[in-house]
Image (tube, rainbow, N blue to C red):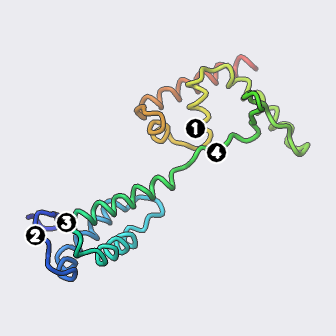
Amino acid sequence: MSKGRISSSRPKPATWDLFYERSGRRLYGWAKKVGTGVQDFDYSGEMNLTLAKLALEYSEVDNPVGWVLRVFTNQLKDHIRKNERTVSTVPLLRMNGEGEYYVKEPSRPDHEDEVLVFRGFVEMLTQLTPEHQEVLLLTYAGLKPAQIARMSGETSGAVRIRLNRARAQCRIRTQEMG
């Protein structure tokens, strides 16, 4: 076995302490490698929790390295799922009981100009195809093309092309509107 590589092909050490002595440093190194860069994810703390759970169940686990890798990976995936940006509602745009969109009236008089601009945007948006509307609204809500691609099952390249085409249509419609 090469140095630093995590392998579960060795026989299970007889005690938890011996397992930790043999594999602990490599497991923390692996956790650092896969957990670095994930926003607000404490890979060291999560590995501590995973190893603490394993210590309690060590006698019942046949493959402790595989168990740790699986549990830690699931914790990382759960963290990513919970912290992905969710699509927020578009400000001022509401849906009535019949499923039609309308622009909410401003609550303060100093917002009237913004509402007029937004009404123009909504009017322009309704002239676009549903695919272009979708990608623009999701982008407006703060999602990146890669996130939209995961949601829609497309490649991020296809989403970027659709977004560029939607923006081009918006420019044309804006010029037509004056």
Q: For numbered disc 2, what is the local secondary structure? A: loop
Residue at 18% in and 81% down: 15
Q: In the picture shown, does residue 62 fall above or below 157?
A: below
Q: Amino acid at mark 3?
A: Asn
Q: Amino acid at mark 1?
A: Thr
Quickly name the residue at label 4: 88
Residue 51 placement, left or right of 130: left
Residue at 17% in and 67% down: 4
Label disc, if present, on residue 63 of the rendered structure: 3
Q: Nearer the viewer, residue 110 or 102?
A: 102
Q: For numbered disc 4, what is the local secondary structure? A: loop
Q: Nearer the viewer, residue 148 or 7?
A: 7
Q: Are marks 1 and 4 in contact (CB under 8 Å)?
A: no
Query: Mark 4 against mark 2, which lies toward the viewer?
Result: 2
The tag earlier along the polypeptide, 1 or 2, is: 2
Q: CA gap, disc 1 to disc 3? A: 44 Å
Where is residue 103 drawn, in percent x and y?
79, 33
Label disc, if present, on residue 157 of the rendered structure: none
Q: For numbered disc 3, what is the local secondary structure? A: loop
Quickly name the residue at label 1: 139
Quickly name the residue at label 2: 11
Q: Amino acid at mark 4?
A: Ser
Query: Mark 1 against mark 2, which lies toward the viewer?
Result: 2
The tag earlier along the polypeptide, 1 or 4, is: 4
